[in-house]
Image: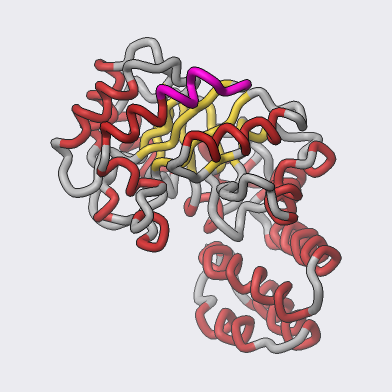
Amino acid sequence: MKLYLAPMEGITTYIYRNAYNRFFGGIDKYFTPFIASRKLNRRELNEILPEHNEAIEVVPQILTNRADEFLQITSRIAGYGYQTVNLNLGCPSGTVTARKRGAGFLSVPDELDSFLYEIYEKSPVQISIKTRIGVDSVDEWERLLAVYQKYPVDELIIHPRLQRELYKFTPHREAFLAAAKALPDIPLCYNGDITSEKSYAELLNAVPAADCIMIGRGILRNPALAAQLKKTDAARLFTRENLRAFHDEIFAGYAAQMAGETPTLFKMKDLWTYLSESFAASDRYLKKIRKASDYAEYRIAVSNLFRECELA
């Protein structure tokens, strides 16, 4: 089974990815948070610089609905030695989909078809796709599969939910089975609601053909999940000492990169929204972390959590 780390805006940065690989590992491929600027701003450039991704396999993800923009971004990325990029057709955020980007692009399959024709015709690198199964109805999936079938998709990562469902309700796993039947020559990857060994076993029971899984929130909540699923050294990795060292490396990385304490604390508090779930009865400690207004307060709140909370 191949395991991928899903791109999550503002969280799975190169600082997080490198720390994760150092302290936990088990991920076969990492994806950057989406790139949307044809000129690559400083944040986006940091995500793809080879020196920031030396020990891990990384695929840059692109968010756009304009073929010329996609090709310009891809050309710049190719200049850094990348051979594959990923097209984001999965983001369900209203601010993204309102502009017919991300999962919103799925609402106009004819336009999507024309877009794919041009980028696959002209791209200097291979293109994988991360997609939802439609916007409002599962009936849209058949039409979308007919579009994907036309192109040499390097890999199709399927989050089997509709855009309107966001991250709620049960994934439509039958949509993944339909894709496996309709696209026998395209490698598929399953994404959505793999948060534990139990949910992983349930997926394999429902979709036994799945041999590649992308995980996002499950790993942010339990960084040892990849090791647990691969039956490696999870017991050694899931300790307070290792989680603390992992946290400290991320904190130090952001503190060195960002201008001032406030933006660094903002990033760390975002991470703690998920990481706190690795600990039992952590709510009141999390409140202290969120209230911290400087590094001193933050370090005290974090130390108290690591010292006093048992692992979940």
In the picture provided, is 47 more to the left or to the right than 285?
Answer: right
Q: From this viewpoint, which residue is outermost toward the top?
A: 185
Residue 311 appears at what percent x and percent y? 58, 64
Q: Nearer the viewer, residue 174 or 80?
A: 80
Colour setting? secondary structure
> Is the residue 303 above or below the residue 225 in the image?
below
**Which residue lies at the image location 43% right of the left edge and 42% below the top edge?**
65
In the picture provided, is 256 more to the left or to the right than 88?
Answer: right
In the picture provided, is 175 more to the left or to the right than 273?
Answer: left
In the picture provided, is 85 more to the left or to the right than 159?
Answer: right
**Which residue lies at the image location 46% right of the left edge and 40% below the top edge?**
66
Question: Which residues are drawn in magenta?
Answer: 117-124
Q: Nearer the viewer, residue 288 or 37?
A: 37
Residue 294 appears at what percent x and percent y? 76, 86
Tell me the chief SS of the magenta region. helix
Is 99 included in the stretch rendered in magenta?
Answer: no
Residue 244 appears at what percent x and percent y? 74, 63
**Which residue lies at the image location 62% right of the left edge and 38% below the top edge?**
73
Residue 265 position by quadrant:
bottom right
Q: How many marks?
A: 0
Is 120 included in the stretch rendered in magenta?
Answer: yes
> Is the residue 113 above or below the residue 292 in the image?
above
Is residue 46 among what the camera can see?
yes
**Which residue lies at the image location 28% right of the left edge and 57% below the top edge?**
168
Q: Nearer the viewer, residue 133 or 20?
A: 133
Q: Nearer the viewer, residue 250 or 185?
A: 185
Q: From this viewpoint, which residue is outermost toward the front?
A: 68
Is residue 206 among what the camera can see?
no
